[in-house]
Image (cartoon, rainbow, N blue to C red):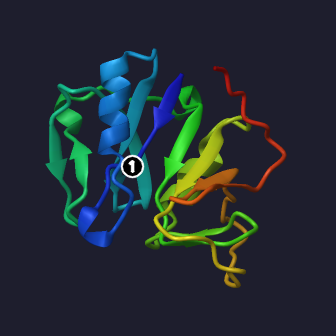
Amino acid sequence: MYIHTFLPILRQNEVNTWPLIHRIWQEQLGVTIAVSKTEPTNHSLTHYLLTSETPLINNRWGVPEPNPASSVQCPVSEIDLVLVPLVAFDRQGHRVGYGGGYYDRFLAECHPDCLKIGLSLVESIDKITDIEPTDIRLDACVTPRQIHWFTAITPNVTN
């Protein structure tokens, strides 16, 4: 299984994904982690495998990213689940990001069965009104209080 996650901008109060990443590495769960490098010239993301050995450099916004010179690219077609950063989300699964449409372009490239899970430190708002036709809805969003499901996907949970 390939999980794509964001590396947090802690000063922006994003969910800290590092504990999850370290847990996956420690437990050796058979999960491959991918992260992105931002390509500001064309508002896209390039994806790379993330291991404990992957060298990271901060981009101009202070986001840690893989060094493309020494990292292995990950095709979008391999990704099964995307953990999506956001500023806000609504009860219909729409999200507000930091602008630029980077994640919407990326999510549009993912295969149809790829789960799109937002991570938020705050609960949903009623409705986001400025939805664009290119906006991609989340399948779910995890907050400190609950998991909000927006699609009919039933999680396959085993004990």
Q: Is residue 61 above or below residue 68?
A: below
Determine the residue positioned at 40% across, 30% down: 33
Determine the residue positioned at 46% across, 65% down: 121
Q: Nearer the viewer, residue 158 or 124?
A: 158
Q: Which of 148 and 74 is in front in this view?
A: 148
Q: Mark 1 points at which residue?
A: 6
Residue lying furthest bottom = 129
Q: Quadrant of the N terminus?
A: top right
> Which structural element holds mark 1?
loop
Amino acid bearing label 1: Phe
Determine the residue positioned at 37% across, 15% down: 28
- Quarter-of-image position of residue 62: bottom left
The x, y position of residue 109, in whole percent, is 61, 44
Q: Is residue 137 above or below residue 91?
A: above
Left or right of 116: which side holds 51?
A: left
Number of callouts: 1
Left or right of 134: which side holds 40?
A: left
The x, y position of residue 141, in whole percent, is 61, 56
